[in-house]
Image (cartoon, rainbow, N blue to C red):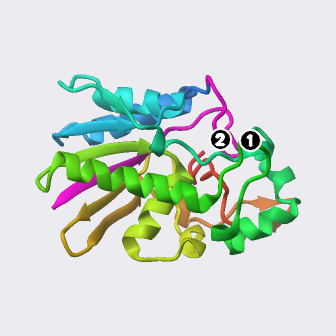
């Protein structure tokens, strides 16, 4: 069986409050660099047959940290790139949540086509990412273990496919920065071994902090783009 280790990139100054999308020149910030170093250390015992990354700088930075000290370099596959959010790119999530399209993204993502000439249907994001994973599986062979560094929504879409879920259910999946998600592909079916493994800590299990004496009510909306994670 072919084992794929999916790693989401580390934090940037835009991760969480802003939908970064394909914003050029967006590198990891200090927090993201520490996250990338930590996940690289976690993965140090694992031998990879290939290290593959989205072309975006935040993923290339993360993949470079993992590749440090290894024989093979990082290969780039555009199909692992972030969803093309079109006119939503670079806008605050609080602002986007007021857009009528937001409810469609939350409840019926398979119908979403992001606005503007560069906007992409979410179903196409899933198609290209799953296609990339399966093509690399075939290229590397059934005994391979390889790493793919990508983005929150892209990894969620790959996990949904592996679980046999319709894309409309992919918002139920959470993928935090520098988390590990592991899928083993066999001739009959994929096995999802780990999802959103951040290596310990219980911050995400604690109740939200109180604001002005009241506890903030958790949102039922999924974070478009993946968000900054529980510890950010």
Q: Position of residue 112 (x, y in %)?
A: 70, 63
Residue 41: x percent and y percent? 29, 36
Q: Is residue 206 left or right of residue 106?
A: left
In the depicted structure, whether residue 95 falls above or below residue 106: above
Question: Is label 2 in a helix, a strand or a loop?
Answer: loop
Residue 11 part of the magenta segment? yes
Residue 90's spot in the image, x, y percent? Answer: 76, 38
Q: CA distance from mark 2 to mark 1?
A: 5 Å
Residue at the spot x=34%, y=37% of the render?
Answer: 52
Write down the residue under mark 1: 89
> Residues at badges 2 and 1 in contact (C-beta under 8 Å)?
yes
Left or right relative to 78: residue 172:
right
Q: Which mark is residue 21?
A: 2
Name of the residue lying farthest toward the front: 117
Vertical relation: 217 (above or below) 72: below
The answer to which of marks 2 and 1 sits earlier in the sequence is 2
Q: Is residue 55 magenta?
A: no
Query: How many residues crowd mark 1 within 10 Å: few (<14), some (14–19), many (20+)?
Result: many
Residue range of the region highlighted in magenta in the rendering = 1-25
How many labels, in total?
A: 2
- Residue in view at x 61 percent, y 27 percent: 26
């Amino acid at each position: 069986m072919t084992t794929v280790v999916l790693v989401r990139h580390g934090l940037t100054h835009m991760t969480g409050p802003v939908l970064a999308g394909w914003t050029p020149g967006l590198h990891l910030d200090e927090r993201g660099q520490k996250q990338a170093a930590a996940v690289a250390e976690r993965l140090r015992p694992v031998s990879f047959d290939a290290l593959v990354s989205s072309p975006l700088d935040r993923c290339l930075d993360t993949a470079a940290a993992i590749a440090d000290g290894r024989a093979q370099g990082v290969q780039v596959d555009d199909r692992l790139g972030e969803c093309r959010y079109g006119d939503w790119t670079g806008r605050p999530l609080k602002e986007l949540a007021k857009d009528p399209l937001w409810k469609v993204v939350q409840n019926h993502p398979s119908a979403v086509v992001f606005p503007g000439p560069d906007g992409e249907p979410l179903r196409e994001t899933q198609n290209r990412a799953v296609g990339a994973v399966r093509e690399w599986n075939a290229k590397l062979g059934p005994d391979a273990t390889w790493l793919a560094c990508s983005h929150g929504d892209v990894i969620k879409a790959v996990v949904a496919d592996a679980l046999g879920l319709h894309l409309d259910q992919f918002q139920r999946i959470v993928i935090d920065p520098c988390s590990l998600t592991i899928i083993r592909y066999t001739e009959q079916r994929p096995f999802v071994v780990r999802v959103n493994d951040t290596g310990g800590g219980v911050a995400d299990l604690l109740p939200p902090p109180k604001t002005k004496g009241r506890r903030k009510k958790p949102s039922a909306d999924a974070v478009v783009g993946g968000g900054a994670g529980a510890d950010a």
